Amino acid sequence: MDAVMRSVVVRKKGMRNWWQGFQALSHHSSPSARRLQQEEENRGRTVCSSTSVSSSSSSSALSSGIAFFSSTPEHQVSSLKPKVEILQGLGLREEEIEKLVPRIQGYSVDNVREKVSFLENSAGVGRKSLVKIISSDPAVFGRSIEHSLKPKVEFLKDLGLKDEDLGRVVPFVVDRSLQGMLQKIAFLESSGLKRDRIGSVVAAFPRIFSYNLENNLKKKTAFLESEATGGESIAQLLTTHPDVLGRSLGNLSRRADFLRSKGLKASLLVRGPCADVSTRRLKAGVDRLVGFGFRMTDAASQMLKKQPNVLFRTAESIGKRRDFLAEALQCSIEEAEQVVLRQPSILNQSEKGIVSKLEFLVNNMGYSKKEMMKYPQFLTSSLEAKIKPRHRVLESLKSLDLLKKRDANLLSILLKMSEKEFVQKFVQGSPEAAALYKGSMLLS
């Protein structure tokens, strides 16, 4: 046995300190461990005088591991092996297990196995999340399933969390008190959230259980309610954008001050994709637009809310598109700028597509290009799927004198009505119109 143990130890260059101490000693008695420890210490003194610093460090680390296990009662050493095997089975790395072993030695094998089984099977926690729970809070093995873990899981289910969401939320509550969880939910209800919506908010942002109620959540919601709701209630805000609570109050305040200083609405903090843009990129993008000559009006706020990607365009690309529109629409630079501000998605349209739509507008519909000042959405609507089919139906009805006087503005009808509204008003009840509409769709 001593020869086997020695053969393990002398291969210290390929071994990993604490972990190897366990592997080398877990199969042997405590007296053997102590003998091995003494041999390792004697050998280490010799090695230190003739080998590199890294080799000495490895030997010292291994000695540390051996020292721990040699001073551990034999029955505890043997009981650690099945625990380590459980951790290995979950996919923990050796260095992670090294850190965990001293912290779980006080828990029985059955205890460890029972908690792992509950979290995986009853709480739906995935392997990756389970590893994070154990690594950050091994004290989870000391919590009662019946009096701690299970009540929290049942509470989350009562909130309406689905099984697929439960596993993502549980890691954020295993180390929280049930009373604290109840206080967070009561706070959401007092903010106006309905009970049937709270579950979706928690599922979308489970980190809410990690924040201090008085010094974090209440202060943030008070700030958002006064500065950035855009006229909507805080309940509506938290329902659609619960992750805004993850931002620090300082971050929110600085962003709000910056937006207001540029003439933009502070509601951009939380409304639309722009809310996900980092503060640094938001500032750089807005400053670039301002420097290029764009005026930060309410229209600009709407643009950034709908099309935040404009913040990442270079001044050159924006200027090129603005100049192209001024030429294509035969309008001034200022007018072209307003078209972009009112319909920012025009920046994503190809020049060829814009030209095709303008040609159809003038040659087939008989309108002037100046109409784009009123209806810039024409340039972002699909020519084949929307404009042409609707135009054919309306022209047919007009030729038959079936359009009412108030419906004479074909461009307004064509663009502003939803598909359902258009079909109900102009297609249903008329076989000719229905055939023409379907036919035009097929032709396109």
Image (tube, rainbow, N blue to C red):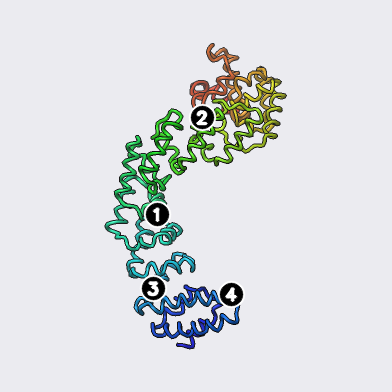
Q: Amino acid at mark 1?
A: Pro
Residue 302 visible somewhere in the drawing: no
Residue 204, position in %: x, y?
A: 43, 44
Residue 316, position in %: x, y?
A: 70, 34
- The quarter of the rendered structure image containing the C terminus is top right
> Label for residue 53?
4
Q: Secondary structure at mark 3?
A: helix
Q: Amino acid at mark 4?
A: Val
Q: How far is mark 1 from mark 3, CA to CA? A: 25 Å
Q: How far is mark 4 from mark 2, CA to CA? A: 61 Å
Q: Amino acid at mark 3?
A: Leu
Q: How far is mark 1 from mark 2, CA to CA? A: 37 Å
> Label for residue 80?
3
Q: Nearer the viewer, residue 425 or 327?
A: 327
Work out whether mark 4 precedes mark 3 in sequence or the reverse, and give the earlier one.
4
Work out whether 35 lies above or below 411.
Answer: below
Q: Secondary structure at mark 4?
A: helix
Work out whether mark 4 precedes mark 2 in sequence or the reverse, and give the earlier one.
4
Q: Residue at 34% of width from left, 52% of height from top? A: 176
Relative to 429, is 281 on the left or the right? right
Give the number of the mark in front: 3 or 2: 2
Q: Amino acid at mark 2?
A: Lys
Which residue does the numbered mark 1 point to in the structure image? Answer: 171
Work out whether mark 1 precedes mark 2 in sequence or the reverse, and give the earlier one.
1
- Image label count: 4
Q: Residue at 39% of width from left, 52% of height from top? A: 172
Q: Secondary structure at mark 2?
A: loop
> Label for residue 298?
none
Give the number of the mark in front: 1 or 4: 4
Work out whether mark 3 precedes mark 2 in sequence or the reverse, and give the earlier one.
3
Which residue does the numbered mark 2 point to in the structure image? Answer: 265
Q: Nearer the viewer, residue 63 or 389?
A: 63
